Amino acid sequence: MNKHYDFIIVGSGPCGLLSASLLSSIGKCLVVEQGKKIKQEENNTYTYDHIYNAYVGNGFNLAFGLPPVILSEGRVIGGGSTVNSSLHHRAPNHIWDLWREKYLLKGFNKDKVNEGYKRIEETFCTNFGNLEPSIFYKSAIINGEKVERIPRWGKENNKGILNRCTAAKIFINKIKSNNGFINESTKFLKAYRDRNNNWVVLLKNILTKEKYSVFCKNLVLALGAGYTPSALYDLGLRHKKLGKFEIHPTARISLYYPQYKKPISVVEPFQITGHFPYLMIGSSANKTSLSESNYPFRENKHNIDYSKVQNFYSMSPSNKKGRIVMRGFLKNTKFYFLDYKTKLFIKKGLKIIINIAQKSNCEYIYHAGMIINKKNLENKKMVNSFINSCIQKTLSSVHIMASSSIGENKLLCPLNSLGKIDGIENLLVIDQSTFPSCPTVNPQATASLLSMLNTKNYMKKL
């Protein structure tokens, strides 16, 4: 095995693979990924096999708090683009303005950002599609809610099934055609500089348990917001904001519509956005197996046909910080405590979902801790108990970010605007950890944009 490279990229999510596709055109490149390659079509997503093989902790991944938060972090070739719903959002203009003004983010003016998003949208074949909304969203529109169709990475076929454009589909062949290499089932342990200022990268083959070293001139970290901070800490970076992450706190709820079939798409590409930026309501995966796992009892006491269950979330973006432990026995353990304001917005979203469910003739509403039927919806005490229980039992986030923020405000940002540590050459950081703060929407497109632009900036100085 070749041990000397121009570039080693640690992490194969959209950021890592996009960066590798650019860097492999100018030098010998190795991508290292702890996970492996799995099936990536829409029907493969959110299955038990998919969750077990593609997520950190085989799907059991917590930020400890009261209540604890279930985190979804990909550990697979293609990263988040392999495991998520493929929804595409541009971060709002007011977020970019905040990043420029508060965090002093340089090199990302409006024209450059807009052109960057256009390039990402072209690369990942972003399309709106033409699927009809389900009874839930039709009822939401009738009841005065603002419902938007969200574009996705890929195109729908003539049956309405999304042909997903994941990072693995887009970039792997290009990387390999440039004589690049991708090592899956390979764990990054640590890196250090030798006397010739080359990087020595210590790796472990998860299957054989073999440890070995490879060498490179340039090291690129794209481990994800949950793990990049501890890697930077190991390299000697000390900053009070390093490892202080943000999430999109979310609660999930299931609605049983016995008279309607579930939507064709695994995740329905619609969201209720009239309460944005404090609250967003959208669809969770409409997988029969997940709908069954959300049911609060082992036996199906209510004779629910899980193939006719639709799943939804109430998400409230928050700037409340969690903390990642970066050394010792608890290294990479996460702690997060939900703030009162965010909890109130999540409650409001759940009330909106329940109100729409009631008006669209939903038979049962349930989550992992409790179930109520349409007759109980007039009982405010029972509904409030249901909502409180929902937050306690289902609090989660599929987005973790802003744990190694970029910008020129040294008090707030461990990294500079270029994704680098001042004084350490030949090191680049490109993943969701580099967000200055919570972008309020799905972060995948913005993370890819930051990766593309900062990789290009890095290449200019080589």
Image (cartoon, grey):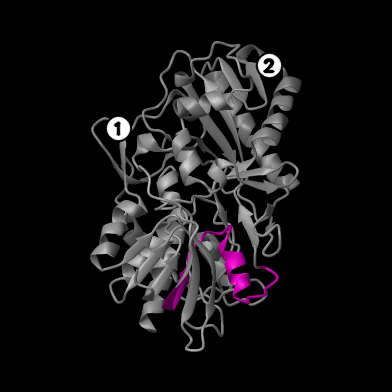
Question: Which of 292/316 is in front?
Answer: 292
Image point (49%, 50%), residue name? 74
Q: Check the picture and name the quadrant holding the N terminus.
A: bottom left
Spot occupied by residue 31 in the image (x, y as percentages of width and height): 39, 64
Q: In which quarter of the image is residue 367?
A: top right
Q: Quadrant of residue 265?
A: top left
Amino acid bearing label 1: Gly
Question: Which of 67/347 is in front?
Answer: 67
Spot occupied by residue 106 in the image (x, y as percentages of width and height): 50, 76
Spot occupied by residue 274 in the image (x, y as percentages of width and height): 53, 41
Q: Check the picture and name the quadrant holding the C terminus.
A: bottom left
The kind of secondary structure element at disc 1 is loop
The kind of secondary structure element at disc 2 is helix
Specify whether residue 327 is painted magenta. Answer: no
Please determine whether, in this image, residue 425 is positioned above or below residue 97.
below
Amino acid bearing label 2: Glu
The number of callouts visible is 2
**Left or right: residue 441 compared with residue 395:** left
**Left or right: residue 175 compared with residue 296:** left
Mark 1 Cα-neighbour bin, 10 Å: few <14, some 14–19, many ≥20: some
**Disc 1 marks which residue?**
160
Checking the image for residue 40, the label placed there is: none
Please determine whether, in this image, residue 33 is positioned above or below residue 385.
below
Residue 404 appearing in the image: no
**Disc 2 marks which residue?**
378
**Left or right: residue 95 compared with residue 126:** right
Image point (45%, 34%), residue name? 47
Chain part drawn in magenta: 214-241
